[in-house]
Image (cartoon, rainbow, N blue to C red):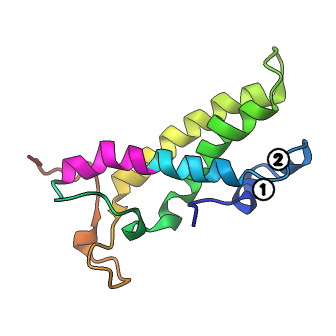
Amino acid sequence: MAMSTDSDLLDIVPDILSFGIDSFADEHARAQADIERHIRAVWWDKRGFAGELKPQYLTESQWTRSAVYLVLWKYALPQLTNWVDNDRFLGMIDFYKSRYGEEIEAVFRDGVEYDDDQNNVIDDDEKIPINDGRLVR
C-alpha cells in the first residue's frame, strides 16, 4: 500500500484529476520509494540499526503529507505544466517542493515511528527523532 493516494491529493488540490490525467497511482508508488530511500539515508543509518530498513514497520500515515507534497512537486505537476512563465502549475511545483522539505524534516524531528517488534504499538523506543540530542556513532 502506498503512503498516499489520489484521494489525499484531492484534499490538497481539489481539481488535480480534472486536467486529463485520471490517476497518479504510479506516481504514489514512486514517491513512496523516494521517501523510503530518504529515510534510509537520513535516519536509518544514523540510528545504528542492524540489517536493512523494513518499510512495512513504518507507520505509513506518518508520511502521507510528505508523500502528497512529493507526488505534487516531483511527479504530478510537472506532467501538467507547459513550462512557460505565469503557468499555474509551474509556481505550484516550487511551492510543494518547499512544503515537502519542511514536512519531511518535521517528521524526522518529531520522531520516526518504526514498529520493529511488530506488536502494532509504537513504544517510546520505537519513535526516535533524528535530532534527539544524543551522539550516535
Location of residue 37 (image quadrant): top left
Location of residue 129 (image quadrant): bottom left
Percent of width and height locating residue 117: 26, 79
Packing grade of label 1 (10 A; few <14, some 14-19, many >=20) is few
Per the model, the C-alpha gap separating discs 2 and 1 is 6 Å
Percent of width and height locating residue 88: 83, 29
Q: Is residue 46 magenta?
A: yes
Please tell me which residue lies in front, 25 or 64: 25
Give me the residue at 81% from left, 14% from top.
85
Percent of width and height locating residue 114: 33, 67
Residue labelled with disc 2 = 16
Residue 62 against residue 136 in the figure, above or below? below
- The reply, left or right, for residue 77 in relation to residue 40 is right
Segment tinted magenta in the rendering: 36-47
- The reply, left or right, for residue 35 in relation to residue 53 is right
- Looking at the image, do the residues carrying marks 2 and 1 touch, with CB atoms under 8 Å apart? yes
